[in-house]
Image (cartoon, rainbow, N blue to C red):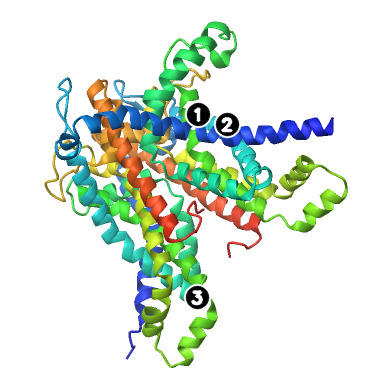
Amino acid sequence: MRRVKALFYSSLSLLCLLLLFIPLIWILVEATVRGGYYILERPLEFFTDIGRPPGIPGGGIGHALQGSLYLLAMALLIGAPLGTLTGIYTAERRNSIIAKISRFVSDVIVEFPTIIVGIVAYLTLASRITGIFNTGPAALIASFSLGLIMVPITARSVEATLISISNEIREGAYSLGLKDRQVLFRILIPIAKSGIVTALLIGLAKIAGESAPIIVSNGISNFWFSNWTEPAASIPVLIYVYGLSPFNEWQTLAWAASLILLLLVLGLGFLARMVTKEVWVRV
Amino acid sequence: MIKITTFYILAFFTLLTILILPFYIGGILYGSREFYERISFLDFLLGKEWSLPEQKYGALPAIYGTLIVAALALLIAMPISIGGAIALIEFLPKRLSDKLGIIVDLIAVIPSVVVGLWGLLALGPFLKNNLYSFLSENLSFIPLFQSSFFTSYNKLTASLVLAYMISPFALAVIKENLKLVPWSIKEAAYSLGLNHWEVVRVMLSYIKPGILAAFMIALGRAVAEAVAVSMVIGNTCSFSFSLLDPACTLSTLIINNFAEATGIEASALIGLGFVLFILALTLVILTRFIYIKALGGYLR
């Protein structure tokens, strides 16, 4: 009886694991079949053209690709230095009060609903009533929220990398009479290089798929990128809008865009995996 | 004169990062200023109706929807995550489980909008044709499955999609905790003559605080998720009990209407954001303390 029970429950646990893989495969197959077919059919149009009005077949996601590129580049410009430098400080001065507070803050904001980040950025910066810049929905605000979302993720991974470097190396460096700056830039950062790259890739993978803060702070656009103070198109928002539309052509485009986004995000994930073997589902 | 050293510069940037939290808190308080002027917060919080044509904005249906869908998602996700973690750590050979572990991690990085699209165009219609038609024809005497709507997009679809999105995170936490169970505990259990599954049960009771932490992390994510849920929940606010009725949540109302809202509706949406903010902040801080306690300072 005990043996039967053990067998039953162990097969149940394997079944649970299997259940997690089914939707993943389903999503990949669906995106490849429904979207990949379209991409193969009109590759040039897909990557370089903008969406067509409903009912007219064809069109592409060029504008969204371009918009995403701009948004992510600017977000990286805002989030990467802040996250990396914070991570370095919290690792190298790990017992200081600032480091302890920063660790707490990173832990809290990393789990924060991203939609709230978008709302806060919109209300304080872009809103026509309460915003400082008074621009209305704008690409720059979306980039700013994405940058903020990226900071704690990057900071924690950079910190973990630097902490894993053994103290003897620091002691050795200092005992040679090197200054803080030299120890940091000549010794520690070169050692931690791959870890820092991983941290940035993880951060980028996380914000590349974000859509809620963009929808809230940047709104929806179906055109080419024009200005940082105007809404920009982006792949996640395009998937959202086209997916919810009742038109078949647009839904196909949404699947095709999903395929691209999946390849991008999973690619970044794999790249990060290749650079180090660290776990990247971080709490 | 103060000499500016490398670490002063680093400390400056760290302080900037620390300022993000006050910026979020201050920003939402400052931004919802306009909302307090227009609506009394208590009336808003206890308002039982959310309807645009009637200009009635009450948060209660959205709070109800958020909690119901999150609870249901956790009910589905927790057993699956626990089972999956056990399978990975205990029942599969290490090499295979390492590879499968990577794939589970991959699930966590699928963008929520892609999961939403899958729920919208693949899972929803599939469930409608195969499950919901059966439920509403044969089991409609149970209030849970009684519905006047017959739609792909309802609380159950939303919970399933949400459950899929939070499972990898809960699983990762439980897995880490299972790895931390000391060998002495397992050896003691084996030496009592327990079989593999019974040892696993001993381990599970040993990591109860870790399971609670996983639960809290999953709950935080379930409450926060906006895009995927808004694509499959049907977006009709009501207090209906049935799982097959559409609903709305705090974040879905915001995401659907924030871009175009003006006047009092915009204020009410900001109010919803405020409620979500309080809910999320409480959960996040609570989770952090539970998590640290669970791991006994493992996280420093």
On the same chain, marks 1 and 3? The answer is: no
What chain is tagged by disc 1?
A: B
Q: Is residue A212 visible?
A: no
Which one is nearer the viewer's eye here, A220 or B178? B178
Eye-nearest disc, 2 or 3 = 2
Disc 2 + disc 1, Cβ < 8 Å = yes
Q: What separation in Å lies between label 2 and label 3 (alpha carbons)? A: 42 Å
> In the figure, is residue A268 to the left or right of B171?
left
Q: Position of residue A98 (x, y in %)?
A: 46, 71
Question: For the residue marked with disc 1, what is the amino acid?
Answer: Leu
Mark 3 — residue? Answer: A96
As shown in the figure, which amino acid type bears the numbered disc 2?
Ile
Quick one: label 3, few (<14), some, or many (20+) residues within 10 Å?
Answer: few
For this rendering, which residue is in front, A207 or B38? A207
In the rendered image, the vertical position of residue A206 relative to residue B128, given as above or below: below
Q: Quadrant of the C terminus of chain B?
A: bottom right
> In the rendered image, which residue does mark 1 sit on?
B160
x and y percent of residue B186 in the render? Answer: 78, 52
Label 3 resides on the chain identified as A
Question: Badge 1: few (under 14), some or many (20 or more) residues near its Cα, within 10 Å?
Answer: many
The CA distance from mark 2 to mark 1 is: 7 Å
- Depth-wise, is mark 1 or mark 3 nearer the camera? 1
Q: Which mark is residue B76?
A: 2
